[in-house]
Image (cartoon, grey):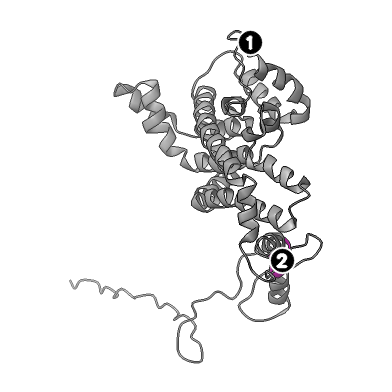
């Protein structure tokens, strides 16, 4: 009895990818996944996208270009729009330095650096307690943190001035010191909320495995939780630094002498000085702009990653 014949295995035939006239494979997609349907070929959608990009670039970049060009111009005017300096000079920066802009700049650096470190430490500890531990009144505590973001600075300016002049219990006068500006900025409701939501998404299995190995609370926070919250820390760091750096009312009410002012308050002083022109004020604005720009460029990737992670969470 002969064995039945076995059909040979047939290899499926796959269609070859389309080739261009030059015989090369097409590597660029015909249409990108965008709201306007960006196309690799010139057309109405492509022209509209380019036009909108140029319009957005002009709206956002024009003020910065005007500030930079005016700070290097010999005779700058705040009423004209110019992207290139007229008769370039560094005289405006020299005059701003003679008016003490660098001393105010140093005060801002000390306050922004110390305030940011204190703010990140306090907000991280508060967020860890709210996200990884259950206790009575937890929702109320988080709500109180959020309510602090809804109070305008003008409302709490007078009470805060009285408290800084005579701190309850200890009876210390913090006016005229950097602590008078740093301590009120030690906690920010936005950073607490942001870090709390990120820490809630950390799997409990990781924490349980670490506790079996004898990891304590501080070590758990430092070695387990914080490395997983780097995107959120980047967002909190960038936005927190900008918030502290842009403070105007708090340094004003916490100062006893004009030498205690920050660079933001110094800009208003330069603006009201009749002996200086618009170019000196623009030079001071450029000096005040540089730190925020540097912090953003250094933490740009963490900021974008953190925002994208928060948008796609869940």
Give the residue pinned by disc 1. 168
Q: Secondary structure at mark 1?
A: loop
Mark number displayed over residue 58: 2
Measured as percent of width and height from the top left, residue 242 is found at 61, 42
Indicate whether residue 58 is drawn in magenta: yes
Identify the residue shown where x is 62% and y is 26%.
Answer: 176
Q: Is residue 204 above or below residue 97?
A: above
Identify the residue shown where x is 68% and y is 42%.
Answer: 266
Task: Find the distance from the CA under tag 1 to the CA under tag 2.
Answer: 51 Å
Residue that lies at the very extreme toward the top in this rendered image = 169
Measured as percent of width and height from the top left, residue 175 is found at 64, 23
Is the C terminus in the top left, top right, bottom left or bottom right quadrant?
Answer: top right
Measured as percent of width and height from the top left, residue 226 is found at 43, 34
Left/right placement of residue 62 relative to residue 126 reads right
Residue 314 visible? The answer is no
User: Bounds of the magenta span?
Assistant: 54-59
Q: Image quadrant of residue 86?
A: bottom right
Is the N terminus in the top left, top right, bottom left or bottom right quadrant?
Answer: bottom left
Point out the tag, 1 or 2, that comes first from the N-terminus: 2
Identify the residue shown where x is 61% and y is 62%.
Answer: 90
Left/right placement of residue 274 relative to residue 260 reads right
Measured as percent of width and height from the top left, residue 203 is found at 44, 33
Q: Between residues 47 and 149, which one lies in front from this camera angle? A: 149
Q: Between residues 314 and 81, which one lies in front from this camera angle? A: 81
């Amino acid at each position: 009895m002969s064995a039945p014949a076995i059909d040979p295995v047939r290899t499926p035939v796959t269609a070859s990818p389309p080739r261009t006239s030059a015989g090369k494979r097409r590597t660029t997609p015909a249409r990108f996944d965008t709201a306007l349907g960006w196309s690799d070929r010139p057309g109405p959608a492509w022209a509209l996208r380019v036009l909108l990009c140029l319009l957005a670039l002009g709206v956002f970049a024009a003020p910065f270009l005007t500030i930079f060009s005016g700070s290097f111009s010999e005779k700058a005017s705040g009423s004209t729009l110019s992207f290139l300096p007229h008769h370039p000079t560094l005289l405006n920066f020299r005059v701003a330095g003679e008016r003490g802009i660098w001393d105010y700049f140093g005060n801002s650096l000390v306050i922004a650096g110390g305030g940011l470190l204190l703010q990140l430490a306090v907000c991280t500890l508060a967020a860890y307690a709210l996200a990884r531990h259950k206790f009575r009144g937890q929702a109320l505590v988080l709500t109180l943190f959020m309510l602090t973001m809804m109070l305008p600075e003008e409302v709490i300016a007078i009470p805060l001035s009285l408290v800084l002049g005579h701190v309850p219990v200890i009876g210390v006068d913090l006016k005229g010191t950097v602590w008078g500006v740093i301590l009120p900025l030690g906690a920010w409701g936005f950073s607490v909320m942001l870090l709390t939501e990120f820490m809630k998404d950390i799997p409990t299995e990781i924490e349980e495995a670490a506790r079996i190995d004898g990891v304590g609370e501080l070590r758990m926070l430092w070695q387990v939780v914080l490395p997983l919250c780097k995107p959120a820390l980047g967002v909190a760091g960038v936005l927190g630094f900008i918030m502290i750096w842009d403070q105007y009312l708090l340094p004003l009410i916490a100062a006893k002498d004009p030498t205690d002012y920050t660079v933001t308050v110094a800009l208003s002083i330069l603006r009201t000085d009749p002996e200086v022109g618009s170019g000196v004020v623009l030079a001071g604005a450029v000096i005040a702009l540089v730190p925020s720009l540097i912090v953003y460029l250094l933490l740009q990737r963490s900021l974008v990653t953190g925002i994208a992670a928060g948008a796609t969470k869940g």
